[in-house]
C-alpha cells in the first residue's frame, strides 16, 4: 500500500509539472502531459525492479547452487528477457495505478509547487543511485560472508 501510494504521488508530481509546462512540447515524438508522467513513473519502477532483480541474480550466481549453472547456460535469454519483462510489468502496474488521473488532471494541480518538484527530483536520484548500488552491495556482502 505504501509503495503504490508513493508511485501515485510521484506520478502526480510529474503530471503537475508537465501540465504546467505543456506549452514546451512540440514535434511528432512529444508525449501528452499524462503520457510523459506515465513514462517517468514507469521508468522509476523499472529501475527499482532491475536493481532488485540484479541483486537476486548476483546472489544466485555467487552462492554455489544448481541454478547458477542453469543461469549461465541461458544467460542470453535472461539478459534480454528480464529487462523486457520488467518493463512490461512496470508499464502495466503504473498504468493501472494512475488510470483514473487521465480524465481528472485537476487532481494533480495541488502538486505543482517548487517543493513537490524538488521532492520528485530527489526521489528520482535516490531511486537511481540505490538501484545501481543494490547489486554491488549484494555481491560485496556475499563475498565478505563467504
Image (cartoon, rainbow, N blue to C red):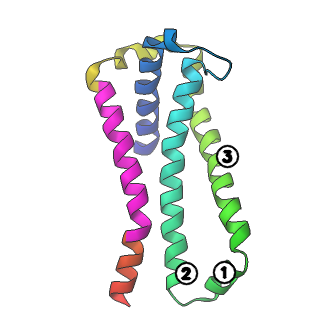
Name above or below for residue 39 compared with residue 33.
Answer: below
Please identify the quadrant where the N terminus is shown.
Answer: top left
Q: Identify the residue at image location x=40%, y=70%.
A: 136
Tag 3 residue = 88
Name above or below for residue 128 compared with residue 144.
Answer: above
Magenta-highlighted residues: 116-136
Q: Residues within 10 Å of mark 3 (few under 14, many from 20)?
A: few
Tag 2 residue = 61
Q: Do the residues labelled 1 and 2 touch (CB within 8 Å)?
A: yes
Q: Identify the residue at image location x=55%, y=39%.
A: 42
Give x and y (percent) for residue 30: 61, 20
Would you say 36 lies left or right of 2 here?
Answer: right
Please identify the quadrant where the C terminus is shown.
Answer: bottom left
| Rendering quarter of residue 75 | bottom right
Upstream in sequence: badge 1 or badge 2: 2
Secondary structure under tag 1 reads helix
Q: Identify the residue at image location x=53%, y=41%.
A: 43
Name above or below for residue 100 compared with residue 127.
Answer: above
Secondary structure under tag 2 reads helix
Residue 118 disc label? none
Q: Separation of disc 1 and disc 2 at Cα? A: 8 Å
Q: Which of 87 and 93 is in front in this view?
A: 87
Does 118 appear in magenta?
Answer: yes
| Rendering quarter of residue 53 | bottom right
Secondary structure under tag 3 reads helix
Tag 1 residue = 72
Q: Separation of disc 3 and disc 1 at Cα? A: 24 Å
Upstream in sequence: badge 3 or badge 1: 1
Amino acid at each position: 500500500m505504501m509503495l503504490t501510494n508513493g508511485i501515485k504521488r510521484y506520478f502526480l508530481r510529474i503530471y503537475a509539472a508537465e501540465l504546467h509546462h505543456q506549452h514546451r512540447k512540440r514535434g511528432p515524438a512529444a508525449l501528452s502531459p499524462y503520457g510523459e508522467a506515465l513514462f517517468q513513473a514507469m521508468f522509476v519502477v523499472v529501475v527499482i525492479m532491475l536493481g532488485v532483480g540484479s541483486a537476486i541474480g548476483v546472489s544466485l550466481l555467487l552462492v554455489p547452487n544448481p541454478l547458477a549453472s542453469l543461469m549461465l547456460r541461458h544467460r542470453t535469454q535472461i539478459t534480454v528477457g528480464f529487462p523486457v519483462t520488467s518493463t512490461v510489468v512496470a508499464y502495466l502496474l503504473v498504468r493501472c495505478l494512475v488510470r483514473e488521473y487521465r480524465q481528472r488532471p485537476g487532481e494533480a494541480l495541488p502538486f505543482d509547487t517548487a517543493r513537490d518538484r524538488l521532492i520528485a527530483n530527489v526521489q528520482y536520484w535516490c531511486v537511481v543511485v540505490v538501484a545501481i548500488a543494490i547489486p554491488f552491495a549484494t555481491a560485496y556482502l556475499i563475498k565478505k560472508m563467504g
